[in-house]
Image (cartoon, rainbow, N blue to C red):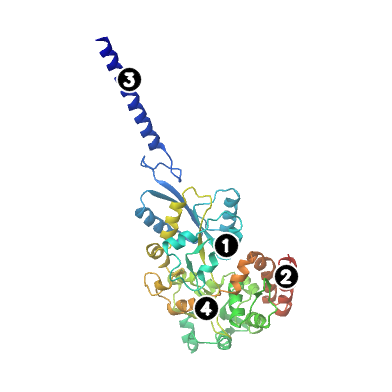
Amino acid sequence: MFDKIKGLALLLVLSMLFTACSAGSGESQGNSTDQGGTSSTSGKKIELSFMGWGNEQERELYEKMLKGFEAKHPEYKVNYIYVPKDYDTKLKTMLTGNTLPDVFWVGETVVPDYAKTGKLEPLDAIVSMNGLDEDFVPGLLDYGKYDGKQYTIPKDWEPYVMYINVDLFNEAGVPVPTGDWTMDEFMDIAKRMTVQEDGRITQYGVGLETWWGPWSVFAGNEGGVWFKDGKANFNDPKVIKGLQRMYDLFQTDKSAPSPSALQQSGMGQSQMFETGKVAMYASGRWMVPTFRQTASFEWTAVEMPIGETRINPLFSGTLAISKDSKDKDGAAKLLTYVLSEEGLKDIIGLGLAMPNKMKYMDDPEMVNAPPAVEPFKATAQYLDTEIQLAATQSGHFSELINKYVQPELDSAFNGKQTIQEAVENIDAKANKELFNK
């Protein structure tokens, strides 16, 4: 009898031990963390971070798109880090502190700068597995590559076009230009659309900014190669021809407000277009949502005028994944969703940019009017896949533009020196200090 009681007691102890071990094992599983650092079975969601720039409209669009991702992948929660200003400064700070988001934007001109840090996850396998490179706009994907690897993927791109105030053209009896207009015709129209009253200009023919986008169009459309063989090449006669056209608009013809004149007016170029103080305005597709809301006149857009050829600079936000992401699988899912048809429809339709794939160009949910969509679609055939790309791949794009090019050109466009003097200074300084290493 005692032995039976002793045996039953032993069984009871073993049973209790087994139950405790099972409970302990279950508790351990419930509290275990996945790569995202959150519980996978306790009901908590896996957290991912996504960072980008943009205006308030873009913020709202991306919030909507990220909600779509969460609905499709309910196990995830995305923390959206919205940076309206000084994005690159924020990104560099996070890189230095090893706190990069899981998925984040990288400007198309600085991809090599970040790729060289070793902090970006190569995306070649993700691209191949998900077919992300299929039917891409020609040359666009190259802006996400460095040293033979795909480190970022362009999510969109923004054509550079000429916006037209149709009402002002009709009042002046000047035909609205079409896509086949030439640089010479453009220069003439800009003069004809400039109005003076009592010796004072009350309406300019064109509003033209002076940062690298506009001047690369003018130089490139004349066949100019401003970066060649790993060095600045602004003394190219064709580059000079394009830059001289801009100089003439600002100083000789005075059919465009110079940077100093614009500063005195207290208005930006886009504001001058919105208020009818310029008849034409050269800018990117990013202006479409604003003009849809603010323009109280009939307006449209045409391709930039053609010179010896046509070229359109590449403006894009590209997507990267942090090398240190704790959930690279989740980050890959998020990146793939943003680039999917479903994701792009949430963020492209407002008119800020163009889709990265040719097959979406005719989708009215992504590319729509006003203004006419054909000029924007046409620029996909002549994106700058050589000059700007070579300058970008040098790893010194920002320094070249900000330190050496822009100060010299702004001085010329304000009439303080000639274009010839400006380009000679650019090449001499940049090639000695920046590219002679």
Q: Please state which of the two labelled residues, at mark 2 or mark 3, is closer to the viewer.
A: 3
Q: Which mark is residue 185?
A: none
> From the viewer's perspective, is 270 left or right of 63?
right
Answer whether residue 67 is visible to the viewer in this image. yes
Q: Position of residue 194 (x, y in %)?
A: 57, 84
State whether residue 122 is above or below residue 275.
Answer: above
Q: Residue at x 60, y 79 (%)?
A: 220
Instruction: Of the two numbered discs 4 and 1 on the same chain, state the one appearing first in sequence.
Output: 1
Label 1 belongs to which residue?
Answer: 111
Q: Residue at x 36, y 41 (%)?
A: 41
Answer whether residue 265 is visible to the viewer in this image. no
| Amino acid type for the residue under numbered disc 4 | Tyr
Distance from the alpha carbon under mark 4 to that under mark 3: 80 Å
Q: Please state which of the two labelled residues, at mark 4 or mark 3, is closer to the viewer.
A: 3
Distance from the alpha carbon under mark 2 to that under mark 3: 83 Å
Q: Secondary structure at mark 1?
A: helix
Q: Are marks 4 and 3 in contact (CB under 8 Å)?
A: no
| Amino acid type for the residue under numbered disc 1 | Val
Instruction: Of the two numbered discs 4 and 3 on the same chain, state the one appearing first in sequence.
Output: 3
Q: Secondary structure at mark 2?
A: helix
Instruction: Of the two numbered discs 2 and 3 on the same chain, state the one appearing first in sequence.
Output: 3
Distance from the alpha carbon under mark 4 to that under mark 1: 21 Å
Q: Please state which of the two labelled residues, at mark 1 or mark 3, is closer to the viewer.
A: 3
Distance from the alpha carbon under mark 4 to that under mark 2: 28 Å
Label 4 belongs to which residue?
Answer: 382
Residue 208: quadrant of the picture:
bottom right
Q: Position of residue 363 (x, y in %)?
A: 37, 72
Q: Position of residue 383 (x, y in %)?
A: 53, 75
Label 3 belongs to which residue?
Answer: 13
| Amino acid type for the residue under numbered disc 2 | Asn
Distance from the alpha carbon under mark 1 to that under mark 2: 22 Å
Residue neighbourhood size for the residue with mark 2, other residues' Cα within 10 Å, grouped as few (<14), some (14–19), many (≥20): some
